[in-house]
Amino acid sequence: MRKFLVVLDDSRECLNAIRFAAMRAAHTGGGVTILSVIPPEEFNHWIGVGEIMRQEARERIEVHFEVFAKWMRDKQNVNPELAIREGEPVAEILAQIEEDPEIGVLVLGAGTHKSGPGPLVTQLSRSSGTLSVPITIVPGEISKERLEAIT
């Protein structure tokens, strides 16, 4: 089965990327993997404190994921899977793509900030020529109705 890989983070634009991935998966019989990356700087503390913070970060991600997963199951009939990785976001996204041969498309949400579309879109689009999967960039300002029309 072809899967859409979408990144779950704290950005507003990730919502549209998740919606797009779920709707495309529903219409094409595919799946969705939601990837959340915990950056290493969150754990530069004493070993015991860092481990507690790591566990708390994982719990927050799982709660956040479950909100989107429920919507996908109820509204799109898609049962997503969650992948949590620790490290630098771009490197971990590339590693996830490399390790899961069923991933067929990387879906990213573009920010609407004056500074640009966001660090993930900027960095990954620069290396898009060497990726093993295409990237779909979903505009952060696109409406839910427009997403439904194009998926």
Image: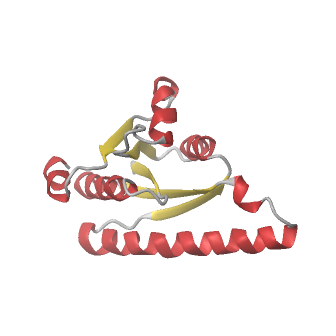
**Residue 9 horizontal/vertical position (percent):** 49, 58
Which quadrant would residue 39 be assigned to in this image?
A: bottom right
In this orientation, which residue lies closer to the viewer: 81 or 35?
35
Image coloring type? secondary structure
In this orientation, which residue lies closer to the viewer: 22 or 110?
110
Left or right relative to 53: residue 10: left
Residue at 39% from the left image edge and 55% from the top image edge: 14
Left or right relative to 89: residue 116: left
What count of labels does the image hold? 0
**Residue 99 horizontal/vertical position (percent):** 60, 45
Left or right relative to 101: residue 111: left
Which quadrant would residue 71 be assigned to in this image?
A: bottom left
In this orientation, which residue lies closer to the viewer: 83 or 143?
143
Identify whether 41 is placed above or below 55: above
Identify whether 70 is placed above or below 143: below
Residue at 79% from the left image edge and 59% from the top image edge: 44
| In the image, farthest residue toward the top | 129
Residue at 47% from the left image edge and 71% from the top image edge: 64
**Residue 4 horizontal/vertical position (percent):** 40, 50
Residue at 45% from the left image edge and 31% from the top image edge: 125
**Residue 55 horizontal/vertical position (percent):** 69, 73
